[in-house]
Amino acid sequence: MTATTSRPVPSATPDGPKRKLTGKQIAARSAVLIGIGFCLLMWIYAFVLADDKPLAQVDDSSWSTRAETICEGRGDLLDVNAEASILESKGSPQEVGVAVRKATDIIEDTLDEVLAVRPTSSRDVRLVNEWESLYRTYIQDRRDVETRLLAGEAVELNETTLNGSPVSLTIGDFTKHNRMVSCSVPSGR
């Protein structure tokens, strides 16, 4: 039989005193822990505490419902105007200008009817006023095209831009968030 000598197995922790962390190590670990804590707080806020309502959504849903009802009728009027202009016109810029004027009148009258009743909260009034301002800009763009068409120029609608995008996109975002999509800028009319 052979004799075996047993060696001591090293323990997971050294038997000596624990090494102290340097100032740089403490600062680095603290920064990592603060960063992790900040990320956790951010996710908790985003998924639990933050309001998920769109910024452009009015609180008065009855105002939005009324607006949608009014604008649904506008679509029918615009369709009738478009059909009549196709049947009656020969395609001259002046005839197109007359059709554009009629359509713009319908759009403007509908906007006036929608805005005849305003929401009551100051936040909602501010949002609706911003939307109205953008819509009035769009209407003025149409009026400018109408004037040029009536003068015999062959032109197309060139919308004012807002942050690099046509103003109609912002108008559409507002109407989408407020469930009044029929009040968006009418396309192709």
Image (cartoon, helix red, strand yellow):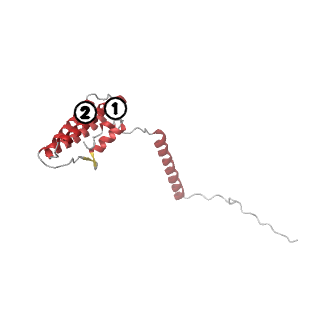
**Other-residue count near label 1 (Cα within 10 Å), few / some / many at <14 / 14–19 / ≥20:** many
Type of the residue with mark 2: Thr
- How many tags in the picture? 2
Q: Measured from the top left, where is residue 124 in percent x and y?
A: 32, 32
Whether residue 146 can be seen here:
no
Looking at this rendering, what residue extends furthest in the bottom direction? 2
Q: In this rendered view, identify the residue nearer to me: 54 or 188.
A: 188
Query: Which residue is labeled 1 in the image?
Result: 64
Q: CA distance from mark 1 to mark 2?
A: 14 Å
Type of the residue with mark 1: Ser
- Residue 143's image quarter? top left
Instruction: Residue 122: give its label.
Output: none
Residue 18 vs 173, above or below: the answer is below
Q: Measured from the top left, where is residue 116 in percent x and y?
A: 25, 28
Residue 113 vs 154, above or below: the answer is above
Looking at this rendering, what residue extends furthest in the right direction? 1
Q: Earlier in the sequence, mark 1 or mark 2?
A: 1
**Other-residue count near label 2 (Cα within 10 Å), few / some / many at <14 / 14–19 / ≥20:** some
Q: Measured from the top left, where is residue 67 in percent x and y?
A: 31, 31
Q: In this rendered view, identify the residue nearer to me: 89 or 130.
A: 89
Measuring 27% from the left and 35% from the top, which residue is drawn there? 76
| Element type where label 1 sits in the image | helix
| In the displayed structure image, the side of residue 90 where residue 185 appears, left or right | right
| Element type where label 2 sits in the image | helix
| The C terminus - image quarter | top left
Instruction: Residue 110: give its label.
Output: 2
Residue 171 vs 60, above or below: the answer is below
Q: Measured from the top left, where is residue 17 in percent x and y?
A: 66, 58
